[in-house]
Amino acid sequence: MKRYDLIIVGAGPSGLSAGIEAAKKGLKAVVFDENEKPGGQLFKQIHKFFGSKEHRAKVRGFVIGQQLLDEADEAGVEVVLNATVIGLYQDKEVVVKRGGEVEHYKGNAIIIATGAAENMVTFPGWTLPGVIGAGAAQTMMNLHGVLPGKKVLMLGSGNVGLVVSFQLKQCGCEVVALVDAASRVGGYGVHAAKVARTGVPFYLSHTIVKAEGKECVTGVTIAEVDSRFQFIPGTEKHFDVDTICLAVGLSPMSQLLKMAGCKMEDNPKRGGQVPVCDEYGRTSLPGVFVAGDVSGIEEASSAMIEGRMAGIVAAEYLGYIEKEELDTELVALDHALDGLRQGMFAPENRGKLIEKTEEQIEISQNLLLHGYIADDEIDRFPGVTHKPGVHPVIECTQNIPCNPCQDACKKGCISIGSNITSLPIAVEGADCINCGMCVASCSGQAIFLIDEDCGDGTATVTLPYEFLPLPAEGTKGKGLGRDGTVICDAEVVSVKSLKAYDKTSLLTMRVPKEYAMKARFFKAV
């Protein structure tokens, strides 16, 4: 029986982070993962992360995944793939199935970082080919280059539903609707806004009545629901689709912990059946720790920090570091994790209707109900200013933990301050040089460079653009409003795709000047 100081189950963001920290402290660590590629969900994630520099903000998920793999290799972490852990028994014995063989391992400490599985909902026709989870859609698109479908309906307006809807559009799918039984958008407003301006309609307080088709999905019917989530007769709506994508939450994969005899609890705020543990992942079993979604559903950025915490806590448990060193390192990690758990999407605010920002500005109700900020609401936010010449317009209207725009602008045109969840402010008196770094660095694609009056009756709008093929200079088309409807004629003035922009091209379009503060997307005709 092979022995390790530390056995980690799961090579996702938390598991790899735990292995890296433990190996740095001198532990002999191994990570088992059932997949043929390590990295967990990271390699599906092509969007840029939120947070600050310490959280790897404005870096795309698959890049972070590769960074973690490189760090693990450099630290000497052994990563074993195609290895399914089928048992966790007393005395920290781990049973692993590899190919046709079953192998036994002993660990002096164990970290379970198995993540979470997608939830499903049932409705007539839900077993038809063409009904898939959002994670499956991401796997098809971003790992295997397979189109999930041509016409897609998305169920779920949390961050996963919003992000995957945008990625479906990027890969060429038509997203006919984004549907949610909840009465308001569940994810970040900036994610909703970038989906809405591409023309995807939102149907809140709606859910699926049935999927249609005999051998595969050919259509779907949705209907409005009341406050008790009962269908309202006469509100049915039909869409011709070949794919129904479900983004209805995640459930922790905590079966191994239950098998091992860890004390468990049913905690809806953490996603379901989770182990009882402290803030650093210590379970009721000495030497058994948890990290990431298995202990409570959060973002991947949080999972990486939790993994680092578990790794150094395991090192202290095994005597590789003193408690004083542990406490010092945990203070810094606590600070980093607290930064991600602030703002209107903090764990204590889940399910609450937040009516005002931290700055006491009324939240856009149109954003919550329809996915986009109404034109008559936008001027009340501090990132939206009017001045001669090119200047940034920052349409970030919710307190979320993110500040790359502040670091990106070398001229100090944008300020967030020391509180990472503060709304960005367009600094008065600062001179924008039209470099576009703020537009490209914004993880929510919520910054635009505007020249409201070019002197000839037109204005220019520079927007983030992540679609192929890129329109050529001089391409004529239409300017779309925040709700995705055509509002004016538009012409492409330039398209910049610098290496520093990290695959976020900057498209500048010319529009009539009365639409400078309204046109937010370009559609070629």
Image: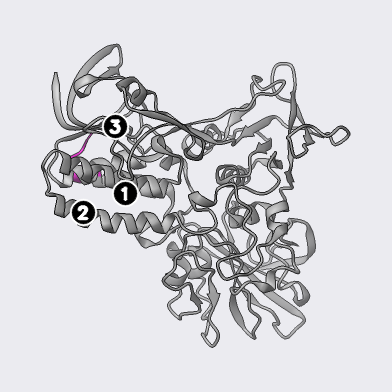
Residue type at tag 2: Asp
Q: Residues within 10 Å of mark 2 (few under 14, many from 20)?
A: some
Front-most of 193 and 208? 208
Residue 407 covered by magenta stretch = no
Disc 2 to disc 3, how far (Cα)?
Answer: 21 Å
Q: Is residue 77 magenta?
A: yes
Q: Nearer the observer, disc 2 or disc 1?
A: 2
Kindly indicate the quadrant of the structure image that contains residue 230.
Answer: top right
Part of the protein shown in magenta: 72-78
Provide residue 447's location: percent of width, then percent of height. Answer: 57, 67
Q: Residue furthest bottom?
A: 429
The residue where tag 3 is placed is 284
Residue 247, image quadrant: top right
Q: Is residue 64 above or below residue 240?
A: below
Separation of disc 1 and disc 3 at Cα? Answer: 33 Å
**Residue sitting at 77 percent across and 37 percent down?**
225
Q: Residue at x 37, y 49 (%)?
A: 64
> In the image, which disc is placed on residue 169?
none
Q: Earlier in the sequence, mark 2 or mark 3?
A: 3
Image location (x, y in percent) of residue 207: 72, 35
- Name the disc covering residue 67, or none: 1
The spot of residue 204 in percent (x, y) is 72, 44
- What residue is disc 2 on? 327
Nearer to us of marks 1 and 3 is: 3
Q: Nearer the viewer, mark 2 or mark 3?
A: 3
Camera sees residue 523 = no
N-terminal of the pair, mark 1 or mark 3, is 1
* Left or right placement of residue 97 versus residue 343 in this view: left
Quarter of the image that includes the N terminus: top left
